Image (spheres, rainbow, N blue to C red):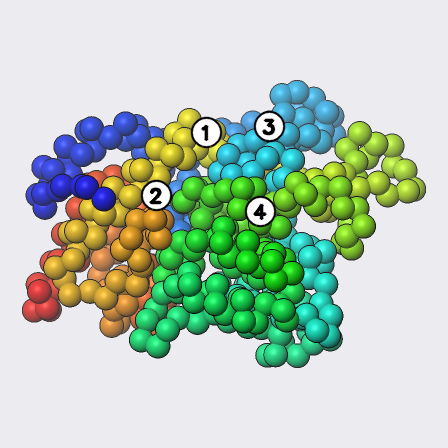
Amino acid sequence: MDFRFRADETFAREQDQADELASFREHFCLPIAPSTGQPQHYFCGHSLGLQPKTVRQAVLAELDRWASLGVAGHFTPPHPWADYAADLLPLVAELVGAQPEEVAIANGLTVNLHLLMASFYRPTQQRFKIMLEARPFPSDRYAAASQAAFHGFNAQEAIVEIRPRPGEDLLRTEDMLEQLDREGDQVAVVLLAAVNYATGQFFDIAPIVELAHAKGCVVCVDAAHAIGNVPLALHDWNVDCAVWCHYKYVNAGPGAVAGFFVHARHARRFDLPRLVGWWGHRSDTRFLMPDTYELAPGAAGWQLSNLPILSMAALRASLDLFHQAKMARLRAKSLRLTEYALALLDGLNLQLLTPRAPALRGGQLSWRVPEPRRLANWLQSHGVIVDVREPDILRCAVAPLYNSFQDIWRLATAWRALTTERGES
């Protein structure tokens, strides 16, 4: 990436002045440092995104509608609750590279993973394994192991991890493909994160899906650390199904309602076993309360219950900002911000875990450091918010909707001050 920079604060200010997305920062509530009363420099969008200022009014509007309309709010415009997701699905589809009919908004990520595994994990004595990347997000491992056990298999035998080469932290695509080719005949489902939560590595999904299908495997993608962070193309990659949350880069609030994807080729596979509920019934006859269950086509057929409207209102507020900003522009800014961060921090003798190649990473940068908790606490005392994954990983993510070049400069300045104090530079 051709990005020339200077290490002075004036350069950071100049970059922010020239940034066509800079105004979006004003749409977010920035955490305030209690000691100074000043906005903090926030780099935890990979864990919990900041609150859009429009969220408060969006939620209050639904509370007012509930107060004044009662049950009639389900069918009263604008945004009747019974069909509240209708105009949100195209916005979510934009972020994951899908058709609107391929996505649904519901539940939590792991709930959705179990619902989809009920349909797509159909193990046999010959093909029962679930393949994951090494060090997957723990909930994925727990869910996969419990699915295997639920079907009567030994979880330790059923779970297969693709591990890095000795002495390396990152997975190579060729190694992932080689192991899948070697063991794929026993693999029922490949469950792979689009972006690994610990290292920030952005996997090359398309060739993995192609080989997995050739070997007879189903592919499920966990896009929790990818949606709103990197460009996704779930439909074109031919992924069978995917799950994600909306509280990280998508900024829909703590514990926000999640989403999932089912590829269009499965839209009318009504023969697939699944766990069903009222909201997965055809929408045109749902309120006729028929005795006979008729599945809705597409991802909607995996829904269970009606929608948590207050959480959906917060999601609406954030999706509107993404729609205005456009993912291609956000991705370009994200790469400039991360490249700037790497350039400023390169001289501090740090072990970077995240790939340096721009195509192989998103906004998250991870370093292996001694005493990461102490480092994170020191940075926080200087107005910089990062987070830790034990025992030795410090994670820092830029979210281009609200992070600035001056944020990056402040991060590097604080970190450099600490290393100077310790005599490490």
User: In the displayed image of the protein, which residue is found farthest to the top?
Assistant: 77
Disc 2 residue type? Ala
Q: Closer to the observer: label 3 or label 4? A: 4
Amino acid on which disc 1 is placed = His
Q: Is residue 320 left or right of residue 266?
A: left
Residue 155, above or below 322:
below
Q: Residue at x 70, y 73 (%)?
A: 126
Q: Is residue 390 above or below residue 236?
A: below
Task: Say how many tags the image has.
Answer: 4
Which structural element holds mark 4? loop
Instruction: Mark 3 and mark 1 in contact? Answer it, CB < 8 Å.
Output: no
CA distance for labels 3 and 2: 25 Å
Q: What residue sits 53% from the left and 32% below the top?
A: 91
Report, in whole angstroms, how far the alpha carbon at label 3 lies from the one at label 1. 12 Å
**Counting residues from the N terminus, which is met first, the one under dot 2 or under dot 4?**
4
- Location of mark 2 (residue): 399
Residue 362 in the image, given as x and y percentages of width and height: 36, 49
**Mark linked to residue 238:** 4
